[in-house]
Image (cartoon, helix red, strand yellow):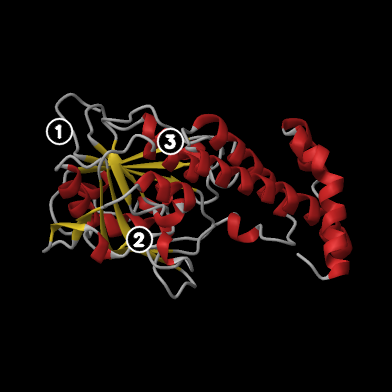
Amino acid sequence: MPSNTPIPEIAIVIPFFQREDGLLKQCVSSIFDQPGHPDFRVIVVDDESPISAEQELTQLPPEERERIHVIRQKNGGPGSARNTGLDHVPPGTAYVTFLDSDDQWTAPFLDDAVHALDQGYDLFMGNSMRLGSERSRFEWNNDTKLNIRVAEHHPIDIDRDIYEYQGDFFDLLVHRSNIIGPTTMAYRFDRFPSVRFDPTIYNGQDRLFKLTLGQHFKRVAFSPKLYAYEGEGINIFDKSQWGSEGSIRLLSSYIRLSRRILEQIRLNPEQRAYVQDQLSDSRRSLALSVPHLMKKGVPVDWRRLFATFREDPATAALFLPNVAKGLLGRVSGKP
């Protein structure tokens, strides 16, 4: 970044890998359509996308392109791309946020985020809607204790509809990290400049990232406004559900994620037991998925399965007992 270029208040990191024309342009245009006047820089990381980021952005006005830094890298997945973006945040930038290339902001997220973070909050998060969901992120959990109810929190700015979170926010993250949408969180990069995503985790790397940050948060601000609609571009997770060819990879990643959380995150006994239960559920689901896939004639990713056995011997040791329990449960009608 040239020495005479002003330091931005906030950097927006966009990992990019898409096969559909127009998504990135739509995404970036939603940034420049934001009301308010925060000084921002956009960092697009082209993760060896089939459609190049440069190709997508050529139609933007020159004054907008000047505020976009495109970085190309060999394909490494969204975590690797976000890490590359974080590595290229201009020195001195106070805040960082993320925007997925198939999403767009529809309300003044940047202005509200900078306003809240300027008051000393470590995190600002907004509400969002996901395609196909009838409820927003703040409301979609069936356990209402894990939702955000505005009346329980302290108002910071009534006009902007911004509140200070009351209670143990880290505990909420442990039990429901998806309360924070992937494109409606902004945090103090100047406090946490070295926190990065774990690219070896196929799905759930954002959860580990949020928990790594969250264990240090002192003050959190939020708004129930709908700042974004999450799109339908390439989403490997949605194509790797139970019974699909990608389910072995997905469940293996969940096992790795839970083990990383138990190893790296400070947890109280109840939180540790909760994550341990998730790990046990993932090991059991992995074991039951193999006969299920074989029965359906879906290919089993044996290489991934045996790699998981090597990495987590407990998964291997419990594999046959979990399969047996599952089969006996079906015979007896019990879960």
Give coordinates of residue 280: x percent, y percent.
68, 46
Q: Which residue is at 66% across, 57% downward? A: 240
State whether residue 303 appears in this view: no
| Element marked by disc 2 | strand
Q: Amino acid at mark 1?
A: Pro
Whether residue 225 sits left or right of residue 303 in the image: it is left
Q: Which residue is mark 1?
A: 6
Image marks 3 and 2: residues in contact by CB distance under 8 Å: no
- Give the spatial CA distance, label 3 vs label 2: 26 Å
Q: Amino acid at mark 3?
A: Thr
Whether residue 74 sits left or right of residue 330 in the image: it is left
Give coordinates of residue 75: x percent, y percent.
56, 39
Q: Which residue is at 36% across, 51% downward? A: 57
Whether residue 7 sits left or right of residue 80 in the image: it is left
**Which numbered tag is attached to residue 321?**
none
- When asked about the image quadrant of residue 36, the answer is bottom left
